[in-house]
Image (cartoon, grey):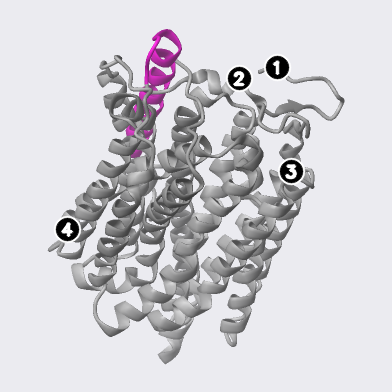
């Protein structure tokens, strides 16, 4: 079965694009607007730092599981029907989050939100690529990525204002008008004609995926506050995750239809993009979670000020991505990636050197610098990942791509939170060894927490720098201007045509 690009009139294409962009921004907006409200949320429902991580990680894990099913939903239901159902589920789950009576209930509703988000983002990306010719894919991916960055721009600011003026519960209600607007614009989204007779779905594969992703996340979360070596329970959970994910890989290779279509990994550009998608997701989303906790914790900011300090990061990302949209066809994608990684590593280094006094200006500047670096990464990665894939693989590839990004985000948050806790415990133990220090113990404890955060940023700077050389595994995209709508060919720097 081959999926061809859908031809739409100009007005219909614009309306469909607006609906796709709003839905994409809505789910991205929700993942960031809650960050500055985490301290109040933890205080209201009970719990500590680990509750905030679970609120974020549950959303990400559910997204990861559902992203792999996006291709099947599209083939079975059609693009418009699947997209509308995902938006409806997302809005309903958001309203349930706003009235959650307990941490357990909130996590369950966040799981439902994440399940809907896991379908919205990859399906929106695939539909967007279908309704535009290939010569416009780079530019549209840049605009689509910039739309995602609207979340980091408006999310922390509005989330902080709403939390300070009303309650953290109202931040979830904002999804109702956004979802209604997106649903109203779905009339022009193509009701795809590629519905398949294929009704079977790999139920065992889904079960293995849930077990694998859930066990992986649980083992990572349970390492928070633990000493090395890990407990037997954590080792068992990690072993279950490895076995379940390995079983998925074996079934995917041997079955004609399964959760994963491994042929997408035969493309070197897509395979390399997946690795960097995982790493960038892990590093960047960890920063999104850490900065509000740092601002409202040892730095003592209120939620509104925390949102204002962090917002320049999203502004820098969005502005850079829009600029990249006009440069993507003129500059070697690898040059953009290397520049973005260097700037991102430099931003992490700046954060690691942040002074405790006068930190607002320093943190604002470092966040803006990081925003520029991140803005140089997303569009080249997406363009390299999808420009050499055939149309019938796009939706499945988008699901896998989203899965890996979500796993990267969840893994990064859990692993770095565990490292943060370990650094705090080490600092507290060292302070205790010094004996009684009088009435300044609270101040010293805040300094220890502050130092743990800056230490984590230093570690992330090193990780970012170490993975830069792998960028040169990408094959150069060479375009034939005389044939703008053909599949772009990935060509290695030596001039040999890459196998697809």
Label 3 crowd bin: few (<14), some (14–19), many (20+), radius 10 Å? many
Task: Quickly name the residue at label 2.
Answer: 266
Q: Which residues are magenta?
A: 232-258
Badge 4 crowding class, 10 Å Cα cut-off, few under 14, some 14 to 19, many 20 or more, is many
Q: Residue at x 15, y 64 (%)?
A: 99
Circle nearer the N terminus (1, 2): 2
Determine whether label 3 and label 4 are within 8 Å by CB. no
Cα–Cα gap, marks 1 and 4: 49 Å
Secondary structure beneath label 3: helix
Above or below, 255 against 392 in this view is above
Instruction: Quickly name the residue at label 1.
Output: 499
Q: Is residue 357 visible?
A: yes
Q: Which residue is mark 4?
A: 96
Per the image, label 1 sits on a secondary structure element best described as loop
Q: CA distance from mark 3 to mark 2?
A: 20 Å
- Residue at 46%, 48% (x, y): give it: 409
Q: Position of residue 394 (x, y in %)?
A: 50, 29
């Amino acid at each position: 079965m081959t999926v061809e690009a859908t031809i739409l009139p100009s007005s219909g294409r614009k309306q469909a694009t607006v609906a796709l962009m709003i839905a994409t921004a809505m789910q991205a907006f929700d993942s960031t607007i809650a960050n500055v409200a985490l301290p109040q949320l933890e205080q209201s429902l009970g719990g500590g730092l680990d509750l905030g991580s679970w609120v974020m990680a549950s959303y990400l894990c559910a997204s990861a599981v559902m992203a792999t099913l996006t291709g099947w939903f599209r083939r079975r239901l059609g693009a418009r029907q699947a997209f509308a159902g995902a938006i409806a589920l997302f809005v309903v789950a958001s309203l349930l989050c706003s009235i959650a009576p307990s941490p357990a209930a909130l996590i369950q509703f966040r799981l439902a939100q994440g399940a809907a988000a896991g379908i919205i983002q990859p399906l929106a990306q695939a539909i967007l690529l279908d309704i535009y010719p290939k010569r416009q894919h780079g530019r549209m991916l840049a605009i689509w990525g910039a739309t995602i960055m609207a979340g980091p721009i408006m999310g922390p600011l509005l989330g902080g204002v709403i939390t300070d003026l009303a309650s953290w519960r109202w931040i979830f209600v904002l999804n109702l008008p956004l979802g209604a607007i997106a649903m109203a614009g779905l009339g022009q989204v193509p009701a795809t004609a590629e519905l398949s007779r294929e009704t079977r779905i790999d139920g065992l594969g889904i079960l293995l995926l849930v077990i694998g992703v859930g066990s992986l996340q649980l083992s990572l979360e349970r390492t928070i506050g633990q000493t090395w070596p890990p407990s037997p329970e954590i080792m068992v959970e990690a072993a279950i995750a490895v076995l379940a994910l390995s079983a998925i890989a074996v079934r995917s290779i041997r079955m004609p239809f399964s959760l994963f279509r491994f042929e997408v990994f035969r493309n070197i550009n897509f395979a390399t993009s997946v690795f960097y998608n995982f790493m960038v997701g892990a590093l960047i989303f960890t920063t999104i979670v850490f900065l509000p906790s740092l601002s409202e914790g040892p730095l003592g900011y209120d939620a509104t000020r925390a949102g204002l300090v962090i917002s320049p990061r999203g502004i820098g990302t969005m502005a850079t991505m829009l600029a990249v949209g006009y440069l993507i066809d003129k500059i070697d994608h690898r040059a953009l990636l290397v520049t973005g990684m260097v700037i991102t590593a430099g931003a992490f280094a700046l954060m690691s050197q942040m002074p405790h006094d006068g930190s607002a200006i320093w943190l604002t500047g470092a966040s803006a610098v990081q925003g520029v670096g991140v803005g140089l990464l997303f569009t080249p990665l997406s363009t390299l990942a999808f420009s050499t894939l055939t149309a019938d693989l796009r939706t499945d590839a988008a699901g896998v791509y989203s899965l890996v990004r979500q796993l990267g985000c969840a893994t990064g948050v859990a692993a770095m939170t565990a490292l943060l806790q370990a650094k705090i415990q080490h600092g507290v133990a060292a302070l205790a060894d010094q004996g009684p220090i009088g009435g300044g113990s609270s101040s010293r404890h805040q300094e220890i927490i502050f130092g743990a955060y800056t230490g984590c940023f230093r570690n992330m700077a090193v990780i970012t720098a170490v993975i830069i050389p792998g960028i040169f595994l990408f094959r150069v995209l060479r375009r034939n201007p005389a044939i703008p709508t053909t599949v772009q060919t990935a060509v290695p720097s030596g001039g040999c045509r890459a196998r697809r």
